[in-house]
Image: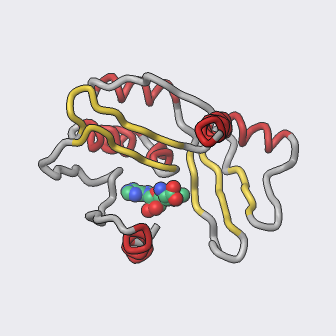
Amino acid sequence: MTLYEAKKREKQIGISASFVHFDAFQEELDFEITFNVVVSNFSFHYDFGNDSTIKTAINNVSKHLVPGGFFLVTVPSASTIMTYKKDGKLKNKLFETSFMEKDSNGYIFKIIDTMELGCIEYFIDKKKLVETLKANKMQVVYTQNFFDFIISRASLDQTCEA
Ligand SMILES: C[S@@+](CC[C@H](N)C(=O)[O-])C[C@H]1O[C@@H](n2cnc3c(N)ncnc32)[C@H](O)[C@@H]1O
């Protein structure tokens, strides 16, 4: 998302937010503040291109969390994408996905009529994730498939409304 779009949404939603432009996977950040929760939606997987960017990304999160704080992350599901690949569902009129060379852990995702070249996305390497979290005194405490999460929330919300 561009800063322009973020500022537009800030006004639309009616909240007060601060925005900082940086490369969270290559720059060592220090905002001199810690948070109870750090959130990354469909962005964290981009650092899985190499070990250095994984380390920098997790270190940047870790140093901005209070002890016992939470890092909430959503990333594309490798197993869902591989199932779509097997079933020949890697494109429709809105998007297309193509795979890179055989041993690469990346694929190219393109939104039709919006992204001319598409962008490289990476699968999460769970072993490297756990190792790097551990090196930063962090651990995985909960994982859930995104669709299942949305469906479980939807049924909870319906229960609340009833
Ligand atoms: C698929 S978009 C998701 C945007 C938004 N979080 C959402 O859920 O709609 C991926 C986002 O990752 C961000 N991103 C990718 N690489 C980044 C990097 N090295 N440092 C900071 N942000 C990055 C992009 O700027 C983009 O906003």
- 26 above or below 60? below
What x and y, as percent, mark residue 12?
A: 44, 73
Tell me what residue is drawn at x 52 percent, y 50 percent. 42
Between 12 and 20, the residue placed more toward the observer is 12
- 145 above or below 106? above
Q: Quadrant of the C terminus?
A: top right
- Horizontal side of 135 relative to 6 (left or right) equals left
How many numbered circles are shown? Answer: 0
Name the outermost residue toward the front.
Answer: 162
What x and y, as percent, mark residue 65?
A: 24, 37
Q: Quadrant of residue 150?
A: top right
What x and y, as percent, mark residue 44?
A: 45, 46
Name the outermost residue toward the left.
Answer: 32
Q: Quadrant of residue 54?
A: top left
What x and y, as percent, mark residue 125?
A: 52, 32
- Horizontal side of 22 relative to 66 (left or right) equals right
Inspect this view and state whether residue 104 appears.
Answer: no
Inspect this view and state whether residue 120 appears.
Answer: yes
Tell me what residue is drawn at x 33 percent, y 58 percent. 23
Tell me what residue is drawn at x 31 percent, y 53 percent. 26
- 135 above or below 62? above
